[in-house]
Amino acid sequence: MGLTLDYRPFTSADLPELEKLWLHDTKWGGLTKQMWLDHVVNAPLGPPAGMLAVDSATGAIVGQFPFVRVLVEIDGQVRKAFRPSAPILSQRISGLLQLANPFSHPVAVMYRQSIDALREEGAALLVMVPDPRWARFLRMFPGLQVGKVPLFSRPLPLTQPLEVDPEYTMAPLVNFDDRVDALWRLAGRHHGVALARTADVLQAKIGRGDWEVLGVTRSGRLVGLVASRQKGDRQWLVGDLISEDLDGALRATLRAVIELANRRATEAPEDKPIHKVCLAVTPAMQAAVTGMGFVRDNYDFALVVHQLDPAISPSSIAPGRWYISAND
């Protein structure tokens, strides 16, 4: 390969070097100090874990694989877990790689060394929704399950108004408070496994940026919450969606986001049209989703679950038991 790499955990002192790596070797732009504060210093569950790849000769950081701390609920039991973020590798290093063994690739080494450290921290599992092209590579790691979550969509603009249920009212959700926690205690029961979506987690995840968040109430009680935004120049993407039940409250929450998407499609400029509203759909949600006019689209999200705690039954964390949203 023509170079030697060392691997170590990253710290706050690495910010200047990581800024350069993000700026020159990703399409995301630079890693700003505000992003570092939001996602590292002030992250709801603590700073990410993970490894850096360092050029042994120069000391320069040439790769990063961060793992975000999350809580996962497995049949009502809350466990510590991690969600891998996208790995970064310097384009200069990528051009020098000529590896017969894929496990020698720096990304694989960072992943493997991170797993050992996370297991020592007591993590139950890793969960990720990677680019589907990564799924084949990830299948090579033992203890890992790969599944799919289909995308469903509904064309926009609407050809006729949706039927209104007067029991429910919809409005922008501004405060992520105890009502959100109470809603999640009910919504979290609909699937065997899910990333915890408590008020503080959702505040950090969708409470800033360009997500539009709606709350659905019935008799003054919050029974649904949904985040959505424009994705690219063709679709309105639904992210986190939780509801008190999988019947009326779910349909009302879907209705709220369809109507919002329709307004945004009507307002969209001609050079940035919105042709459909889309969301990831689990088996438990499918009846309500199809009942609201959604049909199967031609895309699947890859869902990867890597078991770290040997005491967990693999079947209890199988991909088909998870609630996953498009912004996970």
Image: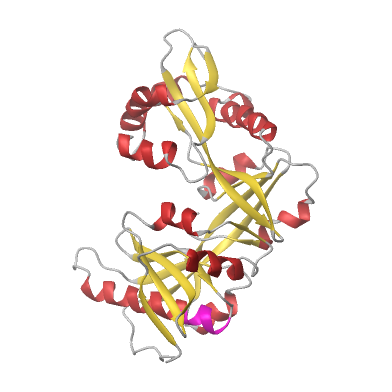
When the figure is inspected, residue 138 is found, relative to residue 150, above or below; the finding is: above
Front position in the image: 83 or 43: 43
**Residue at x-position 57% and y-position 28%:** 110
Q: Percent from the top left, x then y, of residue 126?
A: 63, 44
Q: Percent from the top left, x then y, of residue 166?
A: 42, 92
From the viewer's perspective, tell me whether residue 225 is left or right of residue 191: left
When the figure is inspected, residue 138 is found, relative to residue 293, above or below; the finding is: above
* Quadrant in which residue 156 is drawn: bottom left
Kindly tell me whether residue 202 is visible in this rendering: yes
* Quadrant in which residue 59 is drawn: top left
When the figure is inspected, residue 81 is found, relative to residue 263, above or below; the finding is: above
From the viewer's perspective, tell me whether residue 58 is left or right of residue 251: left
* Colouring mode (rainbow / by chain / secondary structure / one colour): secondary structure
Secondary structure predominantly adopted by residues drawn in magenta: helix
* Quadrant in which residue 230 is drawn: bottom left
Residue 86 drawn in magenta: no
Front position in the image: 225 or 28: 225
Kindly tell me whether residue 32 is visible in this rendering: no
Residue 248 drawn in magenta: yes
Label count reads 0
**Residue at x-position 43% and y-position 77%:** 216
Q: Percent from the top left, x then y, of residue 189?
A: 65, 68
Q: Which residues are magenta?
A: 247-252
Q: Percent from the top left, x then y, of residue 36?
A: 37, 36
Residue sticking out furthest to the top? 57
**Residue at x-position 31% and y-position 34%:** 33
**Residue at x-position 63% and y-position 52%:** 72
Front position in the image: 188 or 102: 188
From the viewer's perspective, tell me whether residue 223 is left or right of residue 237: right
